Image (cartoon, grey):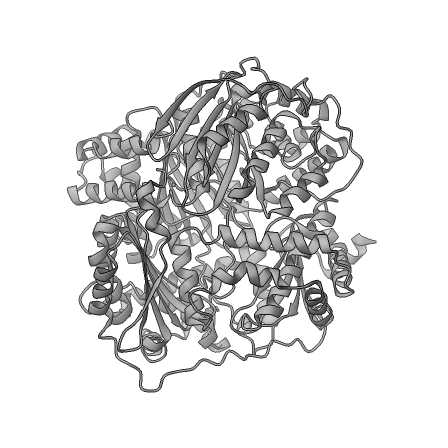
Amino acid sequence: MAGTFFISPKTKENIHFFTKNQDLNVNSISTGIPFSFGSLSLSLAPMLLLVISLIFPLTPAIFAQEKETDMNSTSPNTASAQEKNPPQAILSRQSYPNDITVAKLGNGLTVIIQENHTAPVATVRCYVKNTGSINETKYLGAGLSHVLEHVVAGGSTTKRSEEEIRKLIDTFGGITNAYTSLDVTAYFIDCPVRNVETCIELIADQMQYAAFVPEEFSRELEVIQRELADGEANRNRVMWKMIQETFYQENPGHLPIIGYLDVLRQTKREQIIDFYRSRYIPNNMVFVVVGAVETEAVLNQVAQEFANTPRGFDSEVLLQTEPAQIAPRQAVREMDGTTTDICLAFPTVDLYHKDLYALDLLSYILSAGESSPMVRDMQYEKSLVLGLTTSSYTPTYAHGYFSVRMSVEPKNEAEAVKTALDHLYRLQNEMVSETELARAKKQKASELIFDQQTVQQQAESLAQSFMSTGTPMFDTIYVEELQKVTAEQIREVARKYFRPEVLSTIRIVPKGTIAAETLKKEADKDSAKETHSFELENGLRILIKKDSHLPMVDMKIYAHGGNILDTPETAGRAGFIANMLNKGTRTRSNEEIMAWFDSIGGLLSFSSGRNTISGSALVMKEDFPQALEIFADCWLNSTFPEEKFEQEKTLILGAIARRAENPSSELFEAWADALPKTTPFHIVSGGKKETINAMTPESLKSFFVEKCLDPENTILTIYGDINENEALALAKKYFGSMPKVKNHQIINFDRANDLAENRAIHKVTGKDTGMVLISYAVPSARDEKELMAIRLLNAVIGGYGYPGGWLHKELRGEGLVYSVHCITRTGMAPGYMIFVAQTYPATVDEVVERIFNNIRKAASGQITEEELEIAKQKLIAIHAQSDTTIGEQASQQALNLLHGFGINYDKTYEARVEAVTMEDVKAAAAKYLTRPYLQVTTSNLKKEENQKDQK
């Protein structure tokens, strides 16, 4: 599920949870570290999000609960939703670069529009200011903003019932959700651009005419209570909560967004209606539309949709000032797991302080990239930490903090803390080098470009920038100001803020221990040109596509490999190999490779999937020639050095140890272990302790050279702002010498996945949560029509990766589960259709039976034409959203070509979906959902205890 980590742009904490389903290539190595490596310099939209899904829960916005609704008089707007008054006057408007318009309506509503015609999609969003947990005044601690978000998002309005809204969005495959942060609540719908008018109307209705049906309120209150309880078992969520509580003792920043359980239980429907009426007013909202739209049409429609709602009383909240910290603070908590999570933090400044820029660059210098001093020293050379990141958090509501977060083995905790502080205190006396400073500045400039590729990223950037600073262009201003920072200023902020007397240390220990906007102009419409395919004399195939809408170049390489070539005895080999490909070549060390990419703000990575080993590099266009040279050097000439091998081995073993700390990882590993040994899905992609320990640098290198370095089994892609002829010439120069393989390998994907008999496994864990997984064998991607029927069946039953379908309506609707999904985990080798849910330990058996009831319903053909049509639109819309960046397009085309489908295979996706008939879907359900199944459950109850509780 996407969005389970969060980031904190300098001022707002927002979730990003748009994911792409890739059946053919899945990342095989998980570090197990609950935060991203390197620096998190948290400045508005270009910054990564650092906060967990508790703070921005993945709240389902559409619920399929049909009922009689009372839609009278709860809306703050006394006018009817059907009345047609004259549109609101447009009092002012201002144009910005990149087709951005900011307008103010007569009732105070701010409207921000950006035209981006890269793809025929759009996002419609509304941000309600002066909400969030810090702005709830007399309701502080109740999480009222979050409750309101649950009820309003997709809930009934005075115009439509909840069910009608769900069906309407399903007809065009819209993706809708909402989130609550410390100081804003946001609602959005992502859609094909042809449906943008409908989405504007739906969001406007939610903001003005929520009906607050009593049954919907009661149901959502129950869901939130379970959500709150589940958050207490998640280390990331708990760590964020502990940090906030440690730093903000008077300011309401210490209050959890979701509220406190005992206060939440007292929440009344009348209270959220009162809060809605006082805060959901036009002069408190920012309405944002980004995509392939026409500015005038959007602005006129928004003015009409809000015609009936006048300006409200100003609702700005004066917050309690946080007193200066004058002594060290500590917090510690025990949780399930074998490692220790640590946060070392110093109080600093808010968003508006001039030291913001120096602090952000300092964070980047310390930990951005493998060549950064802290990461290189602590993670790779000394192996003190399993993961490390620094961040400068500077919100609008109070002073922020500079933090170092680490995950360590308990035995290394003391030395890791000492070494981390030594790195910080050293900067009080030593000046950073001009090279380090230039590298950090380039990284931020690159980030501005890389984080502005999708309409969702652009909308989030525009809104967050405007609400915090009054301009949608803050990202650009921010990077310009960063360029002015000097080494002297870096040293000055280190001296000013890194003071031991105000150090806060927050620990979670094992039990028993105590997008700047995408630049789109009329001249860049050549970005949609066709991909050109070439083949070198050695058999290497190259895909090149010119796309000039952003000044960057994406390079990828895919070769047959991955888990498909592993065995249970070599589990984790493919991922280990991928991790070693940038660790040194015949002419370059790992430090030289990563230092160069860090210096230009570029990205370089290698990974493995079910069927491939791959590499990826993303750089600014001026850096492309040298980047391709180093990229090729890593692929063709890696030496697998012993020292780096041992470092990676330590990290992988640490990740393996951490898998048991995550309920989902624990569940899927138990499932994989129980599968037939003939299927590649039996192999745990991250490896096992014993398999990793058995590997050597020589065994990894020889396997890669002999089995994977085959040009006839390899695809290279170069997409972006390039000259196509020059790109091809460089590709020939650096990859043309790749030798042909005498015995070209044809991979056998016909791997038996049949389950011999029904089997149920229950694993007792130390976690106060219940997990359920039920799986059935299904065909491979090569059986495309039958697999498409399975995917449609997936959408009908389980929502196809998003909240929806029969299971979500029944189980989430009744508060039985926190999440429930149906996923199709298959690829070139046949795989499995999987039903997975998270519930209470005592309700595991009931959830299992409810899922089986729905499986039997599907197998007996009880699917309606309407359900099938909704499923088709869902698949088509999700696929369109997953193919909008040049990197996504390169990956899809490369994998399709490598696996024999051709580079234009994706263009037929909609037609292939529409070609599936009801008979096809029913036949697939009857064929595959009546086969033997494998059921795996986990909880902290023994099976008999669980059954007893159920009685």
627, above or below 222, in the image: below
Q: Name the residue furthest top.
A: 313
Quadrant in the picture for the C terminus: bottom right
Q: Is 838 or 164 nearer to us in this picture?
A: 164
625, above or below 301, in the image: below
Q: Is residue 448 visible?
A: yes
Quarter of the rendering containing residue 616: bottom left
Tell me the residue at 49%/31% (across/down): 297
Tell me the residue at 78%/33% (across/down): 69
**Residue 775, percent across and down?**
65, 66
Tell me the residue at 74%/31% (across/down): 213
Q: Is 652 or 631 nearer to us in this picture?
A: 631
**Residue 450, percent across and down?**
34, 46
311, above or below 485, in the image: above
719, above or below 7, in the image: below
Horizontally, residue 659 falls left or right of residue 703, namely right
Q: Is 238 or 555 nearer to us in this picture?
A: 555
**Residue 731, percent across and down?**
24, 66
Quarter of the rendering containing residue 869: bottom right
Horizontally, residue 936 falls left or right of residue 721, namely right
